[in-house]
Image (spheres, rainbow, N blue to C red):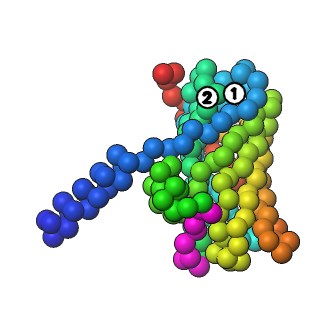
Amino acid sequence: MWRTVVSLTLVLGAVACRYQPTPVPLLGDPADISALKGEWSGEYTSLDSRRSGNITLTIRAGKDTAFGDVVMVSSVGQAIVAADDPRVHLTHAPSPDVLRIVFVRVIGGMVSGELEPYVAPDCSCVVTTVFQGTVRSNTVNGEYFTHGAGGLRQQGNWSASRRLVASR
């Protein structure tokens, strides 16, 4: 038992030290970007794909990049895999089912963006997901659309809440 705990601690420590989230480019007016500073976390769900998961995004004042990920969970227990080479993917995400946010655009009270392409378990095809949402104070609510081969089109909803952080 003790060896198992020590081994697990060492593995988790190695993964934590290795994980270097890729910066997410923020596109938009600096004032619009600054208005979104803080740590955002939330969830998304889709009846179409039966997938759900968590979203995190950290935006610091005066920066044109953020850091964030999307953790995707399939209801049928199938792995979600990034479409890029697994060795490359693991340099910017701690596991196969963590997807990188490619960019975020901010215009007034609206946000939009895109996830890195991934292989969806329901079609075994590479898909692209775009999202959009409306910011109201410390919450954002929106929808997303996934497109893939053969005319695949799925949609879902997402929301996130902000926790303000000190500027660094």
Q: Residue at x 66, y 54 (%)?
A: 116
The quarter of the picture where the N terminus appears is bottom left
Is residue 156 shown to the viewer in this render? Answer: no
Q: Type of residue at label 1?
A: Ile
Horizontal side of residue 38 vs 115, given as left or right: left
Which class describes the residues within 10 Å of circle 1: few (<14), some (14-19), or many (20+)?
many
Q: Does the magenta stretch include residue 80?
A: yes
Q: Which of 153 and 164 is in front in this view?
A: 153
| Residue 51 on the magenta span | no
Q: Which residue lies furthest to the right in this view?
A: 151
Residue highlighted by disc 2: 37
Q: Where is residue 42 in the image (x, y as percent from the top left)?
A: 60, 49
Number of on-image labels: 2
Left or right of residue 42: residue 167: left
Residue 50: image tag: none
38 lies above or below 161? above
Q: Are marks 2 and 1 in contact (CB under 8 Å)?
A: yes
Instruction: Where is residue 144? Give x, y as percent.
Output: 76, 56
Q: Is residue 121 left or right of residue 95?
A: right
Magenta residues (range): 76-83
